[in-house]
Amino acid sequence: MPGVSHLTTRARGRSIARQFRGLSRSVLLDVPYRGERGGHTVHKLKTLGITVITALVATVLAAAVPQSATASAETSAIITKTNEYRAQNGLGALAENAAMNAVAQAWAQQMGTDNSMRHNPNYSTQIPAGWAAAGENVAAGYATPAATVDAWMGSTGHRANILSGSYNSIGTGWYIAGGRSWSVQVFAKYAGVTTPGSTSYKDATSLIYSLYSDILLRTPDAEGVNTWRNYLVNQGWPTLTVANAILYSDEYYLQRIDAAYREILGREPDAPGRADWLYRMQTRQVSVDEIRLNFTRSMEYYLNSGGTESSFVQVLYQTMLKRPAVQSDLDHWVTMSRQYGSGYVVTSIWNSYESGTIRLNTVYQGYLHRDVDSDGIRSWVPLITAQSDQAARSALVGSLEYLFMARARYPQG
């Protein structure tokens, strides 16, 4: 049977519990956070405005999972499940925070890489400054986001974080490594955060029309408007959760698959290939952006580009960097291609800061209808290089700027 033990310590006259509890072959850890603020150390409990971090690890997965993967669909599922539990307990939904997502995702990947479940000692300084309360849940080894949240809810410390009225914002991370999942929730309270449930009927309608136009490239049908408006207005879903549901829909996947075939390979998709790529995206084996990278690595693309190393590099520069390659560039990449293969050249140019900046600007133009500013470049290029362009899409459509733009584009009277 799982073991249970309990240790209580004292800090500034307050009881801070450290618990080790068993949960279906899991180990639970509930520890206090010590944060530096204004030159002094603060110790707080979540029920008193305290910051608490809790951890959960399961020893086995209920189903097989890939060796290495990140998936924003899974992080959205964690947030959705969390907000469902909050709604069941009379609490408002937590607003998804893109910067907090980045912190949580980075730590999930760090745990997976190290094969070590532990808390992030620096999360409170990595999330945006100005929080009044903050907390963290971590977990390892659960097969699905729902199973992870259910396990957290079965533990007193983790449940307290999820159902705390002290938080209004959340960021999540999900990573697969070593055949196990690694999950993170980061909670915080910020002044000025709009309560997700307060999305007005008019704003919800404007947002839905804007999301459909920018993501699915069409006008929403009546059923879609009613469904998503209900989630936004009546169920308190954050805009980002609704946007991610659309960004990770089969319709969007197929749109991006078809575009990759036409724009990269210069032909219409074949039915078996189209179905295979859709399955890979549905099962999180590839992202909507990686299909373009894979096509660019293909022999079909190489031959379409002239079939020589120098012509291939020249086409890569024109398509990825929007400029011709000078002779020194050609000489360098031809040498790299001969040493490591053409796929190495493709990946290196794709992951370059210059390419990331161009792709980020394309995302800004597509969703905010403007060029990216210097702050956006510094903030987002490293993130999309490490994760994918989809991370930037999610953040932009969940921003206040996007809401204001949606109001102007689709006014509701």
Image: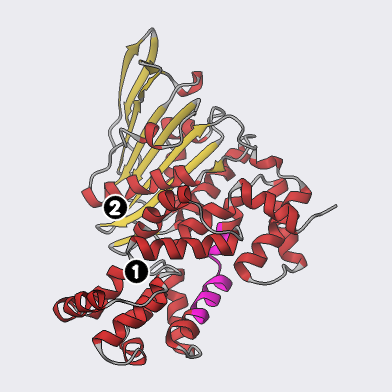
Mainly helix, strand or loop, the magenta region?
helix
Is residue 366 shown above or below 135?
Answer: below
Q: Which residue is tagged 2?
A: 60
Which of 20/241 is in front? Answer: 241
Give the CA distance from mark 1 to mark 2: 36 Å
Q: Which residue is tagged 1?
A: 350
Total number of numbered discs in the rendering: 2
Q: Residue at x 16, y 78 (%)?
A: 335
Residue 297 x/y as whole percent? 31, 80
The single residue placed furthest to the left in the displayed view is 339
Q: Residue at x 35, y 78 (%)?
A: 316
Residue 204 x/y as whole percent? 72, 52
Which of 148/238 is in front? Answer: 238
Residue 249 marker: none
Q: Residue at x 47, y 24 (%)?
A: 46
Residue 25 x/y as whole percent? 30, 44
Q: Quadrant of residue 30 in the image?
A: top left
Is residue 349 rendered to the left or right of residue 210? Answer: left
Please identify the quadrant where the N terminus is shown.
top left
Question: Are the two marked residues, 1 and 2, in contact with CB atoms closer than 8 angstroms?
Answer: no
- SS assignment at label 2: loop
- Whether residue 229 is visible: no
Q: Magenta stretch: residue 353 in it?
A: no
Q: Residues within 10 Å of mark 1 (few under 14, many from 20)?
A: many
Which residue type carries mark 2? Val
Residue 139 x/y as whole percent? 35, 44
Which of 289/77 is in front? Answer: 289
- SS assignment at label 1: helix
Segment tinted magenta in the rendering: 244-259
Is residue 133 shown above or below 64?
Answer: above
Which residue type carries mark 1? Trp
